Image: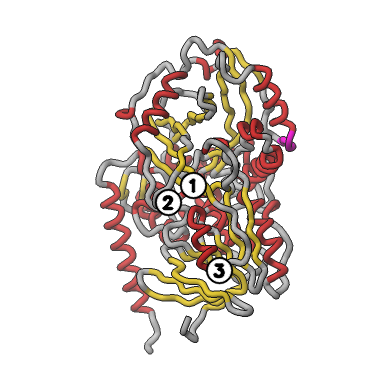
Amino acid sequence: MTTDRFIDCDLLVVGAGINGAGIARDAAGRGLKVILCDKDDLGAHTSSASSKLIHGGLRYLEHREFGLVRKALAEREILLRSAPHITHPLRFIMPHVRGARPAWLIRAGLFLYDRLAARDFLPGAQTINLAGHAAGAALKPEYTRAFAYSDGWVDDARLVVLNALDAHERGAQVMPQTACDDVVRRAVHWEARLSRSGEPLAVRARGLVNATGPWAERLAVRAGSATPQRALRLVKGSHIVVPRLFDHACGYLFQHTDGRVVFALPYEDAFTLIGTTDVEFTGDPGHVTIADDEQAYLCALANLYFRRQIAPGDIVWSYAGVRPLLADEAGTAAAVTRDYHLARDGDGPPLLSVFGGKITTYRKLAEEALDWLAPRLGRPCAPAWTASAVLPGGDLFGATPDRRGVLEFDGWVAALHQRHDWLPKPLALRYARAYGTRVARLLAGCHALDDLGLEIAPGLYEAELRYLMAHEWASCAADVLWRRSKLGLHVRPGAAKAIDAWMAAEQAALAIGRARVAPPV
């Protein structure tokens, strides 16, 4: 790499999905100089295409992955406390099906699930009579008994953004839309060539993190890693969104005769989210869509349980992502482990490659990564810290995570609306859920609805767009409508074009403003 103009850092993290963003956050909080880059938007692929759940993985008990379940259950409560605005507890209903898993086995699994890790505020499992429960009304009459248990829900894309934001506020450079074109290992550092919109950028780093998800094997080979790599098994998971099939706040877990389980979740008030499939994938991970047979499969499974029947024509939105799972001896994609492996290559400047993993365990993964990397970067740094820190906006009742943010969130929203009673209640709730205490920055200087500026799309005002561009790296309508929010489900056709046009004009105005204040050369 022939250039004398390098940006120096302690750690270059390639890949800004949840694992990369989590590692960048942890590293920056330990006092390291960090660069986080991704060829696309933050969380643009697998990390924004999940089932939106924080869970231990009840079905993993069948595969005897007790260590993974224990780790995930412990992380579940840490995450709920640290980000009570973008997460919330979710009660699940699992109807009992004759001929499927026997009741005694389910009860035993739930008993173990409740006890593998401490529960501070989530209620334990129980058997329920569906005839006397709100969840029974939406189900076919043959389902009379069910099992209820607790897990959590998360806005997956916003989780990525908030980790990147916390990393940035602790000193990291966050660079979406910036590809890593080449990496070269030197005697005491890595040299990397990055590019953004065709503009080259050279980086020199003491250590390199490969958090590129489905592309991790490829980057590890390019980096010339001396450590044997764990092969990845790419598995596509697809979801559908249909008009609301039930009116209560619980989710469902449905069993199928093929051994899979599918979730049906309340989503964006007016919808139901159904997924996921587990299908072997061999194509380009950057371009993934749901197949017709996956749509039919999810509709058919939902129709086995719900009174209200659906067909592919009822689908209002669908999404698919490729999970980079660790290759093992599992016969089916559904049985492949969701645990992670950190490939540690310390032969020279360190390289750490992330293989596998799931959203729930991202923080623990990042902590383990830094515990190995930090001593090898040649400079002192602070110890692990993220288990006792909130994410941006999560400090509803102070900077230390606690159960109040989870259990008293509705009261916090009511107080927010009282302070800004000019905000329509649905908008105040959406702002609270998306931004937590950071809503104060979004609403700074606003005392009436008109102060938010023009309504570019229903419920989307200029003030929010400016905030997302200035603080959350949003650069186009897709970033706003499908990752920073899910307003894409609610806006009229053509809204994306209007948002793109507004953002382009705003970017041009900002560029002119910067040029005017630039000092003379």
Amino acid under label 3?
Gly
Is residue 113 shown left or right of residue 432?
right
Which of the 4 image quadrants contains residue 187?
bottom right
Q: Which residue is mark 1?
A: 234
Sequence-wise, which precedes: disc 1 or disc 3?
3
Amino acid under label 2?
Pro
- Magenta stretch, residue numbers: 116-120
Q: Which residue is mark 2?
A: 285
- Determine whether 2 is above or below 426 in the image: below
- Determine whether 245 is above or below 189 in the image: above
Is residue 118 shown left or right of residue 442?
right
Q: Which residue is mark 3?
A: 224
Would residue 118 be counted in the magenta stretch?
A: yes
**What is the x, y in percent for residue 252?**
53, 26
Sequence-wise, which precedes: disc 2 or disc 3?
3
Query: Distance between the Cα atoms at labels 1 and 3?
Result: 22 Å
Amino acid under label 1?
Leu
Residues at discs 2 and 3 in contact (Cβ within 8 Å): no
Residue in view at x 52 percent, y 64 percent: 221
Circle 1 Cα neighbour tier, 10 Å, few/some/many (<14 / 14–19 / ≥20): many
- Determine whether 168 is above or below 68 in the image: below
Is residue 253 shown left or right of residue 405?
left
Prevailing secondary structure of the magenta residues: loop
Question: Nearest the camera: 396 or 243?
Answer: 243
**What is the x, y in percent for residue 191?**
53, 76
